[in-house]
Image (cartoon, rainbow, N blue to C red):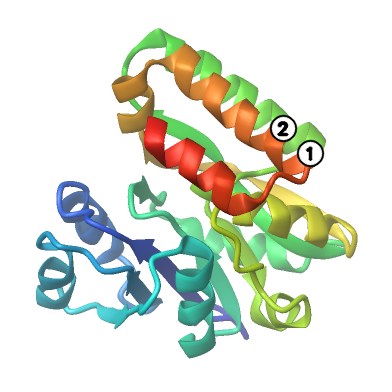
């Protein structure tokens, strides 16, 4: 615990055995922080890897990230929640970074800058664009590690139980209540989807899903489109 704050890191996972060894090694540097994995029904070695590493894991009856994160938040014992994707790595001093932001004026939530785990120069361009959007439009996405006081999270009834765009929806609702802060520190996320589908195609798909959200297309249809291509 730092001061009056303790952090619960909530990590929804599904079939993440390839990324977990790196993630688990990173998390073990912060054993004073509560870690809650929420598995959505993995059929690989994900659950065993988490158990063998000594971390808490909840088995969710529903495979849906919004549901999994809400489930983890309900069982969190800390007053700060950090939602982290299963393919994203935290910086060494992420806990201190979060605590330093919590008392800033009109704080409601925060997120980290984004780094992508690839040496290809094009990813530096993507990082720059993502971080510009986050800093100036105050629209961080879930792969940037969203953190929030538990009391604020509960006051807005957590994530809406959406099939997709749950992080986008959460931030839009939070912006009506106060300020979103972007930390100077970064989290590092996997480049796997960009490398699998290609940068142009991945970016196009993401923008189409956002457009569909604004056009009020049902999240289930957007999720089906996103995952069929994925």
In the depicted view, which residue is nearer to us: 51 or 110? 51
The residues tagged by marks 2 and 1 sit, at their Cα atoms, a distance apart of: 6 Å
Q: Quadrant of residue 159?
A: bottom right
Is residue 77 visible in the rendered structure shown here? no
**Rendered view: 194 above or below 165:** above
Side of 72 where 163 appears, left or right: right
Side of 158 where 31 appears, left or right: left
Marks counted in the figure total: 2
Q: Where is residue 176 in the image (x, y as percent from the top left)?
A: 90, 59
List the single residue furthest toward the top. 121
Tell me the residue at 21%/48% (across/down).
Answer: 19
Q: Do the residues labelled 2 and 1 touch (CB within 8 Å)?
A: yes
Q: Position of residue 187 (x, y in %)?
A: 46, 44
Q: Position of residue 157 (x, y in %)?
A: 71, 79
Q: Is mark 2 on a helix, strand or loop?
A: helix
Q: Where is residue 119 in the image (x, y as percent from the top left)?
A: 31, 17
Q: What element carries label 1?
A: loop
Numbered circle sitting on residue 215:
1
**Rendered view: 42 above or below 201:** below
**Rendered view: 205 above or below 17:** above
Is residue 228 visible in the rendered structure shown here? yes
Tell me the residue at 80%/61% (across/down).
Answer: 174
Side of 27 where 42 appears, left or right: left
Please tell me how crowded label 2 is: few (under 14), some (14-19), or many (20+) other residues with Cα within 10 Å: few
In the depicted view, which residue is nearer to us: 145 or 160? 160
Residue at which label 2 appears? 211
In the depicted view, which residue is nearer to us: 220 or 145? 220
Tell me the residue at 29%/59% (across/down).
Answer: 14
**Rendered view: 189 above or below 159:** above
């Amino acid at each position: 615990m730092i001061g009056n704050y303790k952090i619960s890191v909530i990590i929804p996972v599904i079939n993440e055995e390839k990324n977990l060894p790196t993630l688990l090694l990173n998390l073990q540097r912060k054993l004073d922080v509560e870690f809650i994995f929420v598995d959505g029904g993995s059929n690989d070695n994900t659950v065993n890897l988490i158990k063998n590493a000594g971390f808490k894991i909840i088995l969710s009856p529903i495979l849906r990230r919004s549901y999994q994160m809400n489930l983890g938040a309900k069982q969190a014992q800390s007053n700060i929640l950090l939602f982290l994707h299963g393919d994203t790595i935290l910086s060494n001093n992420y806990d201190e970074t979060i605590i330093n932001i919590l008392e800033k004026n009109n704080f409601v939530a925060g997120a980290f800058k984004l780094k992508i785990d690839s040496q290809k120069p094009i990813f530096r361009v993507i990082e720059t664009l993502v971080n510009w959007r986050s800093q100036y439009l105050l629209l961080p996405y879930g792969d940037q590690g969203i953190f929030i006081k538990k009391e604020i999270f509960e006051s807005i009834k957590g994530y809406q139980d959406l099939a997709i765009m749950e992080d986008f929806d959460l931030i839009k609702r939070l912006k009506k209540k106060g300020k979103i802060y972007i930390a100077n520190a970064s989290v590092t996320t996997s480049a796997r989807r960009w490398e699998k589908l290609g940068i142009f195609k991945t970016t196009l798909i993401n923008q189409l899903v956002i457009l569909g959200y604004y056009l009020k297309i049902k999240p289930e249809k957007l999720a089906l489109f996103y995952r069929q291509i994925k």
